[in-house]
Amino acid sequence: MPNRSFFEFYNSLDNSDTLRPVNFFYGFNEFMGEVLIRKISSGFLEEKSDFNFRRFYFDSDDAHSWPQIIEEAKSSSFFLQSRKLLVAVIRDQKKIIPSKIDIEILTEYIKNPNPNTILVIYLSMNLTMDEFKNLKRSKVSKLINMLGKGDVNIIDLDSITDKQAREYIKSYLKGNNISITASAVEKLLEIKGDDFISILHQLDKMVIADFEGNSIDAEDIDEVITGMEAHSIWDLTEAIEKEDANQYLKILRYLFTNGIKPTLIIGTLIAHYNKIFTAKFLLERNFNIGDVGKVLNQPTFFLKRFIDLVNTFTSKRLKHILKIVYKLDFESKTIGENSAKVLLENFIFQIKG
């Protein structure tokens, strides 16, 4: 069965025919798999319990095995209360490819699975993007080939396009009798960057907010999603460019005090520096300033100030900053919120010079 993208699979889960007894989730953005597991759980299980929802971990301690999981999968019955959702979480690279005996057991089960059990094989590892790409070529692709020979849903958690995100945002809000303008969608994607799991969370906040005429515009995104005025982030990035650590930390504390999450600030920094990088790339290829403004959706009144900022950067410095901010983004998703705040506080000292 061919790979399916995250949003394609997520949207199709409302149709019970989409689910297969065996599903494989993989990707660098492995945390997206938890969104799918929660939705499967809410639709397949009557009420989640220790009996019908279990996780099995394949890591260095050899605590669980495929014979144990398959035996558990076979034990559910057609009674609604007896359905099971089992999640096999692979955390160790050495455990990605099962042993020859385990492959036989798993392959045999895939041929004749228990329809009353949903088995999710879920790759969840703390890797950099490059490490995951190498792992995908060497081992993950082999597991995909093995599973793809049977009736298995194979979900690429990284396969998310801007178009899919836009369509999902519009359809979700439309289902809740809310319309959203194109500029508001652009603003949301700009703020969140590729943090699509965060977009899913923000949509519920947008549904319960009281918008005039049940319509959301770009200004509403600043108010409801970020909870802060747009100039606060501009002031933050301006303090960074001036290497004014005191002002940077002061603004950062203001944002934290007003409930702004570190992930939102990091996402905004990523979008900000990517815009600068894109603008510099276009200017070096003789695009005129007006065209650059159109490509990056920069208002006319703001464009000169933005271009002046772009011209203060060398390509080398921009690449250095982007490398740091992406590393910051990755690390912030694997630690607690307080630790992420500390990483943000240290950010300005990492990019000086």
Image: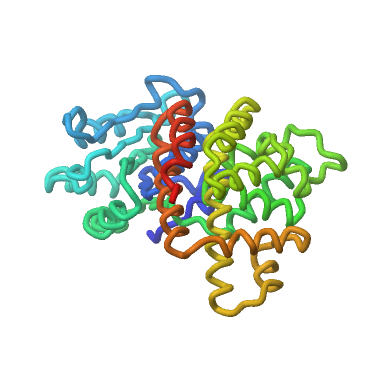
Q: Is residue 131 visible?
A: yes
Q: In x, y percent, where is residue 317?
A: 44, 58
Which residue is painted at 52% across and 42% down in the image? Answer: 266
Q: In x, y percent, where is residue 276?
A: 57, 60
Which residue is painted at 76% across and 33% down in the image? Answer: 209
Which residue is painted at 35% across and 35% down in the image? Answer: 87
Q: Is residue 15 visible?
A: no
Q: How is the image coloured?
A: rainbow
Q: Quadrant of residue 58?
A: top left
Quarter of the figure that contains the N terminus: bottom left
Q: Residue furthest top?
A: 50
Which residue is painted at 21% across and 45% down in the image? Answer: 93
Q: In x, y percent, where is residue 17?
A: 50, 47
Q: Quadrant of residue 306?
A: bottom right
Q: Image check: 304 left or right of 72?
A: right
Q: Image check: 39 left or right of 234?
A: left
Near-viewer residue (188 or 347): 347
